[in-house]
Image: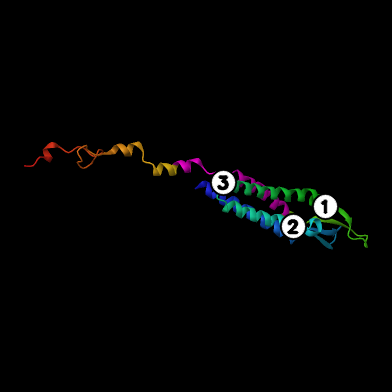
Amino acid sequence: MGIDRTRALLVLSCAGAAALLAASQFTNLFELTPTGGDALGEVKSDDQHGYAIIVLAALSLVLLVVSLAARGEAIAQGAAFAVAVCGVVCLLIFLVIDLPDANSIGALDDESFIDAKAEPAAGFWFELVGALVLTACGAALATLRPEPASLAGSAALTRPSSDDRGLREGTPNGAPQRDLRSPAPNAAETEPR
């Protein structure tokens, strides 16, 4: 039972991470704020790296379904490993493209000379957390194996033990079987009077 609960938690974590990555596509990554002022602009995910994050989030959900529906253990583990790879790619996009722009200062646009700071917004954090959780939980799901004890336990339930086989024996002349666990009947009790 423990492994089923763990698998369910990992699957839900991967799905939640994919949802966070998708949400980062529709929220601001950075707010462009001049020194001592209010935000004058924002930078969205598609401004930074197009729609790569939402495509990877959708792909990870499809792979998660494949992992759950697969009949073979190798296919299920391969799909779960691919979910982790989607998380790694999202993390690389974050580290290479988004992180260097965090807290950078530059001109707001080509026409103005106002300097603004790119302050991380909700989408920045959604992308980071989603990528980390998807990578970690996808890898954990890929390495999760069924418990051998549960397989041995089910075999023990279907195969009689040596104790059960020796408890009841038939007599050679076809007389009814008697349970060896109960005491033998007293000869005085069995003789007719």
- Confirm whether the magenta stretch covers residue 76: no
Residue 38 in view (yes/no):
no
Residue 150 is covered by the magenta coloring: yes
Of pointers 3 and 2, the one earlier in the residue sequence? 3
Q: Tell us which disc is closer to us: 1 or 3.
A: 3
As shown in the figure, which amino acid type bears the numbered disc 1? Asp
Q: Which residue is mark 1?
A: 101
Per the image, the residue denoted by label 3 is: 73
Where in the figure is residue 33, as x and y percent of width and height? Answer: 84, 59
Residue 43 placement: quadrant: bottom right
Quick check: 149 left or right of 13?
left
Q: Position of residue 84 (x, y in %)?
A: 67, 48
Q: Is 31 left or right of 10, judged from the image as shown?
A: right
Q: In front: mark 3 or mark 2?
A: 3
Reading the chain from its start, which is encountered first: label 1 or label 2? Answer: 1
Circle 3 crowding by C-alpha within 10 Å: few under 14, some 14–19, many from 20:
few
Q: Which of 95/139 is in front?
A: 139
- In the image, is residue 23 above or below residue 136? below
Residue 172 found in image quarter: top left
Task: Report the Cα–Cα distance between label 3 and label 2.
Answer: 36 Å
Q: Residue at x 70, y 59 (%)?
A: 22
Per the image, label 2 sits on a secondary structure element best described as: helix
Assess disc 1: are there few (<14), some (14-19) or many (≥20) residues with their C-alpha within 10 Å of its C-alpha. Answer: some
**Circle nearer the N terminus (1, 3):** 3
Magenta part of the protein: which range?
A: 127-152
At label 2, the amino acid type is Gly
Secondary structure under badge 1?
helix
